[in-house]
Image: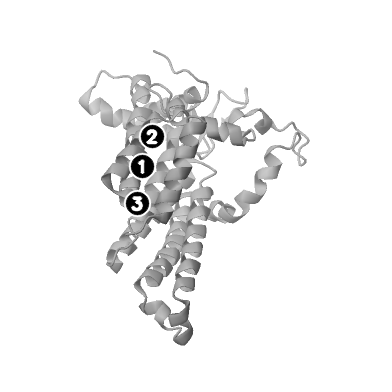
């Protein structure tokens, strides 16, 4: 068997260097790993986003304990299958929190057979797409587990862990900030909703905002998640990476620019299929067609309107 795409070989070559040399470069130059295959004959220093290559390398070292004859390439085939199974489990846990075991079962089932998900996590497709799915799911699950919790220490632990995994996400993908921004927006909207439904009591005594368990938990979750993510993102990837969580959404118009103005070189991002603009029909088809799309809308309506 061989890996079916170009990108997995890019990550695989660096993973092989990590296993053989202890670093992702072909050689060390001035103490830094150098890739002497790219930009020949001078080569280039290895870019820092090697999270996936390190994952392939250490997954191989772990698996080789149980199967010493397994090659690095063969073990790389299994990593997307293993992580995708964890993703399905996380979707089940998220669905169970919202709609019970039956809801979690069908949520996990739909995730497991989703064509877009399957196409990026097949056996042998050792690309880094798995992390784009895994990290948002585990962060969302940890975040949702704080809902209705009465234990402040449990909330603190779960939110700090959510911040930790969000910080790790910065190592795996430059678009990490979307789940961070999304959860902060969710916290803000939830806070406003709770204030509105308790407006009469709060208007009489504003101090009740701290005695109301639901409002208090949302405030704790929001502040702790923001600062824990900031701390871990800075530790793992630096201040500029965390700053891009606010500037990143504004950079999308430049992705489709045909020419990079600072250098006048053609913008190669226009050739990346994943960065093409999507359409409503494309989104519906990726979910399995019109029938499943409307079923999902019906499920959302029922989930919002259900009463305990």
- In depth, the one of 233 and 270 nearer the eye is 270
Identify the mark nearer the N-term, 1 or 2.
1
Q: Is residue 214 left or right of residue 269?
A: left
In the image shown, does 163 or 59 lie closer to the viewer? 163
| Residue identifier under label 2 | 110
Residue marked by disc 1: 91
Task: Check disc 3: other Cα within 10 Å, few if <14, some if 14-19, many if 20+.
Answer: some
Comes first in the chain, label 1 or label 3: 1
Residue at image coords 51%, 53%: 182
Between the residue at mark 1 and the residue at mark 2, the CA separation in whole angstroms equals: 9 Å
Residue farthest top in this picture:
1
Q: Earlier in the sequence, mark 2 or mark 3?
A: 3
Q: Which mark is residue 205?
A: none
Task: Specify the quadrant that holds the N terminus.
Answer: top left
Category of crowding for the residue at label 2, using alpha-carbon neighbours closer than 10 angstroms: few (below 14), some (14–19), many (at least 20): some
Eyeballing the image, is 210 above or below 270?
A: below
Across and down, in percent, residue 262 comes to: 76, 42
Task: Find numbered disc 2 in the image and state the secondary structure of the residue it sits on.
Answer: helix
* Above/below status of 247 relative to 15: below
Q: Which mark is residue 98?
A: 3
């Amino acid at each position: 068997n061989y890996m079916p795409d170009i990108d997995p070989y890019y990550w695989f070559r660096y993973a092989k260097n990590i296993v053989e040399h202890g670093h992702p470069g072909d050689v060390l130059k001035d103490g830094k790993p150098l890739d002497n295959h790219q930009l020949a004959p001078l080569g280039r220093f290895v870019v820092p986003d090697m999270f996936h290559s390190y994952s392939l390398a250490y997954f191989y070292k772990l698996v080789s304990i149980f199967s010493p004859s397994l090659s690095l390439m063969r073990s790389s085939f299994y990593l997307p299958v293993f992580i995708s199974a964890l993703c399905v489990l996380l979707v089940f846990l998220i669905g169970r929190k919202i709609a019970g075991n039956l809801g979690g079962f069908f949520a996990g089932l739909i995730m497991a057979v989703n064509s877009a998900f399957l196409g990026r996590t097949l056996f042998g497709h050792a690309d880094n797409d798995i992390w784009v799915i895994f990290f948002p799911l585990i962060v969302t699950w940890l975040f949702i587990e704080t809902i209705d919790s009465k234990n402040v220490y449990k909330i603190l632990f779960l939110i700090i862990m959510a911040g930790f995994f969000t910080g790790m996400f910065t190592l795996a993908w430059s678009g990490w900030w979307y789940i961070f921004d999304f959860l902060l927006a969710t916290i803000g909207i939830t806070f406003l909703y709770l204030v509105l439904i308790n407006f009469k009591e709060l208007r009489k005594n504003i101090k009740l905002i701290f005695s109301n368990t639901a409002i208090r938990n949302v405030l704790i979750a929001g502040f702790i998640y923001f600062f824990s993510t900031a701390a871990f993102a800075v530790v793992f990837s630096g201040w500029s990476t965390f700053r891009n969580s606010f500037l990143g959404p504004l950079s999308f118009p430049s992705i489709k620019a045909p020419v990079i103005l600072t250098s006048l070189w053609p913008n190669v991002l226009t050739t990346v299929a994943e960065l093409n603009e999507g359409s409503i029909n494309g989104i519906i088809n990726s979910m399995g067609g019109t029938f499943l799309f409307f079923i999902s809308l019906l499920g959302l309506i029922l989930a919002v309107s259900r009463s305990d």
